[in-house]
Amino acid sequence: MSTKKLNQKEKYRCMTRDLDWEPSYQTKEGIYPFERFEGIRITDWDKWEDPFRLTMDAYWKYQAEKEKKLYAIFDAFAQNDSQTKISDARYVNALKIFLCAVTPVEYQAYQGFARVGRHFGGVGARLACQIQAIDELRHVQTQIHAMSHYNKHFNGLHDFAHMHDRVWFLSVPKSFFDDARSAGPFEFLTAISFSFEYVLTNLLFVPFMSGAAHNGDMATVTFGFSSQSDEARHMTLGLEVVKFLLEQHEDNVPIIQRWIDKWFWRGYRLLTVVGTMMDYMLPNKVMSWAEAWEMYFEQAGGALFKDLERYGIRPPKYVEQTTVGKQHISHQAWSIFYQHSQATNFHTWIPSDTELDWMSAKYPDSFDRIYRPRYQYWRDQQVKGERFYNQNLPMLCQVCQLSLSFTEPDDDTRLSHRSLIHQGERFHFCSDGCHDIFRHEPEKYLQARLPVHEILKGNCGGSNVEEVVRDYYHITSSEESFEYLGSPEHRRWQQWKNDEPKPDGDLPKVI
Amino acid sequence: MSIEIKTVAIEPLRHTYSHIRRRFGDKPASRYQEASFDIEARTNFHYRPLYQPDKELNDPTRTAVRMADWYKVSDPRQYYYNSYVQARARQQENVEHSFDFCERRRLLENLDPALRRQVVLLLLPLRHAELGANMNNSSIVADGTATSLTQMHMFQCVDRQGIAQYLTRLGLLLDGGDTTLLAEGKRLWLEEPAWQGLRRYVEDTLVVRDWFELSLAQNLVSDGLLYPLLFVRFDEQLVRQGGGQISLLTEFMRQWFSEGQRWIDGMVKTVAAESAENRELLQGWIDHWQTRALAALAPLAELGPGRDALEAVAGEFAARLKKIGLTAGAAA
C-alpha cells in the first residue's frame, strides 16, 4: 500500500471543513436562523481563510504547557507574599479596575464566541470562534486566579462579578459588551474580533500587562505573557473576518463601515478608563496614554485602514476627534473618579509632584494649562482638610454611559454635550460619536440602564448614595473608597514597608 | 527531623472572594470554586438581543426547566480550564503514541479487508455526527446558565472537535494517507439508508431551541446509546475478529465517554431532583429522544455488533437512568 502524504492545508481541511455536510432533513435557514437578518450577504463560506490551523490535540498540548508554567508562578507569588514586592500599593487600584471591568467582559466574550461558534453557516469560522470561546474562559479563570492572592490582602476585588452588574462606572464596560452580544453574529464579530481585538487590543493589553511588569506584579504580567499567543490568534481572526465579509459582497461594505464607525467610537470611549489607569494608577509609568494612542492606534491603525481602502473602507468616523482627545481624556476621567470616589471600589489621590511633572512633560499642550491648576487647587483643599468630593450624581451619556465630562473637540474649555428628542423624550450624549450611534439605533439605546437614573428612581436598594454603595454595591466605603492617603490600605502598606524608604515620599502629608 | 524556613506571616484580610464566601463559607476556596461559581452576569442587562427580543441576555428562561440556583449543577471532575487541558494533554499524548505506533508498525495495512470495510461503514460517518454534537454543545454554552454548568459543555464542545479529528486521522491512516475513505464515509452519512435515521436525529437536534432538552438529546441520550454501541460493542466485535489495532485508536473515545457520564448523570440528577415539574419535563424529553435514538441506531446495530448488542446497550442505559432517578419509559 502506498502512503500518500497530504500537505498541511489539505490535512487541516479534512480535520475541519470536511466534517460539514449539506443538511436535507432540516433547512439551512432552520439550522442557522440568525445569519440573514443583519443584511450581510455571504455567497460562499468556502472562501473563508482559516486564520490559524490548530487541531484540538495540538491545542490541548500547547495550552497545557502554558498553563503549567503560569500556575507555578501563581503559587510562587502567593507563597512568597509577593504582593509586598510591588512598586506601591496604589498600583493595586489598577487591578481592582481590571478584575471588575475586564474579567467580566472576558466572560461575555466566552459566551458571545460560543454563540457565533454555533451560528455561522461556515464550519471554518465556527471552529475558530469556538477556540476563541474556550480561550476567553481561560482568560476569565486565570485572571481570577492571578488576582486571588491580591484579594486576600487588598480591598476592592472581593465581589467583582456582583459589582460589575451594579456599580455605576462599571456600566461602561458592561453596556459595551451587552451591546455587542445583543447584536447579530456578524456585528458581534466586527465589534469584538475586529474593532476591539484587532484594532484596539494593544491599548488594553499593553497598559495593564506592561504596567504589571513595570510595577513588580509578577502574577499579572505572567498571565499577560501566557495569553499573548491566544491574543495573537484572536487578532488574526478579527482581520480575517472583516476581509472575508468585505470580499463576499459589495452590499456588505456600507454595513461594515457603519459597524466600524460605531465600534471604534464605543471602544475609544471604553478605553478612556484604561488611559486613566495608565496615566494615574501606575506608580512606575510605562508610557503616557497619548503615546500609547499614537503608537498603537494612529500608526498601526493608520496602516491598517490604508490597507482596507481597496475594499472601499475609510478610517472610522470622528477619528480626528481622538487625536485631540488623547491630550485630555485620561485627565478628565481621573477627575471624574477623584470627585466621586466615595462611590468607587478603589482609591483616588492627587499625583505626586514627580508625577505631575511627568504629566506636564507628556501632555505639554494641555496639562499645565488645564489640569495641573485643578489638581493644585484640589490638593490645597485637601491640605486644609477639605478633600473635595462631589455630592451630586453625574449626568451620563445615553450610549457610552460615561459622565458628560469631556470637552468639545475644538474648544477644550467647553463641555461637550449633544442631545436629541426621540418620541417626545430628550436623550443626552457626550459626543457626536455617541449621538450618531443612538440616532442610528434608537430602539436599542433607549433601553440603556443608566446607573444614575436607576439610583434616582430608587432601583438600587437605597435612598441615598451611602446606602446604595453599602447595600447594593457591596462596597465597604470606610475601607475601600475615598482618598488613598490615610486609607487603611495605605496604612497597611506602610506597615509592610516599615523599614524601607517610602516610595510615596513626595506625596503630600495630609493624613 | 524537619527543616523550618523562617518566613514573615502576613495575616490575610479574607480567605476568598465574597461571592465564594457566601456560597461555600468563610474559608480558603479551591481554584475550581473560584473559577466556576457566581461569576456570570445576572442582572441589569442593558439591551435585549436583536435576534431574540423576547429574552434578556443570560435569560434563564431559554429552557423550560426551572432551577432556583443553576450553580447547584457542578462538575464531579472539578474541571476548570487548567485542570481540563492538563487532563486532555495527558490523554492526547497516549493517543499520539498509539497513532505513531500503528503508523510505524504499519498495523492497519494488514487489516482484513472485510474489517476495514466495517470500520469505514460504522466509524467514519461518525465524523459528521461529532460535528453535530460539537455545534449543539456550543449552542448550550451560548444559551445556558451558570459557569459551573456551561463550562462543562464548553469542554464537551471542543472535545467533539477533537474526537472528529481523531476519527479523521483514523480514516487517513486506514487509507494510507489518502482521502477516499473519508469521502466514502461522508457518502454513507449522506446516502446510506442505515445512516439516515441518525443523520435525521442529528439534524433535528440542530433546531432544538431549549438548551436543556438539547443537552439531554445530545449528551445523555444520543451519546449514551451510540458510544456503548459503536465504540464499545462494535469494538469488542472488531477485537474478536482480529481488528484490535483499531481498538488502540478509539481508546480515547471510550475513556472520554466513561469520564463524561459522571458529570452528565450528576447534572441530570440534580435538575430532576429540583422539582416534580422538572422531573416530568426531563422524563418526557428523554422518552422522546430515546425512542428516536434507538430507532436510528437499530440499522447500524444490524450492520455491526447486532440487534442483541443494541438491546444490551438499551438495558444498560435503562439501568443508568434508574440510578439517576428516572426511567427508560416505554422505549426500552
Image (cartoon, coloured by chain):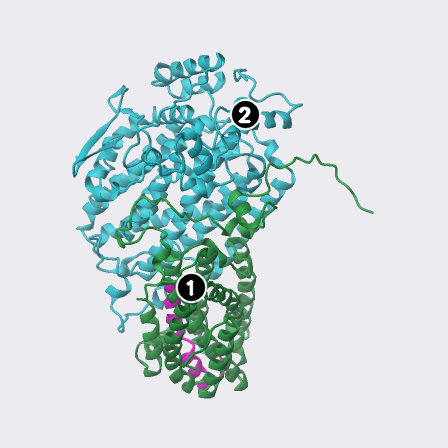
How packed mark 1 is, by other alpha carbons closer than 10 Å (few <14, some 14-19, many 20 or more), is: many
Instruction: Provide the residue designation for mark 2.
Output: A487
Residue type beneath disc 2: Ser
In space, the residues marked 2 and 1 are separated at their CA atoms by 52 Å
SS for callout 2: loop
Segment tinted magenta in the rendering: B109-136
The residue drawn where x is 45% and y is 83% is B310
Foreground mark, 2 or 1, reads: 2
Residue A103 in the image: x percent, y percent?
Answer: 45, 43
> Does A122 sit left or right of B175 as displayed?
left
The residue drawn where x is 60% and y is 32% is A85
Magenta residue check for B87: no
Picture quadrant of residue B97? bottom right
* Chain A colour in the picture: cyan
* Viewer-nearest residue: A64 or A99: A99
The chain coloured green in the image: B
Instruction: Give the label on residue A381, or none.
Output: none
The residue drawn where x is 48% and y is 55% is B71
Q: Main secondary structure of the magenta part?
A: helix
> Does B111 sit left or right of B290 as displayed?
right
Q: Chain of mark 1?
A: B
Instruction: Give the label on residue B161, or none.
Output: 1
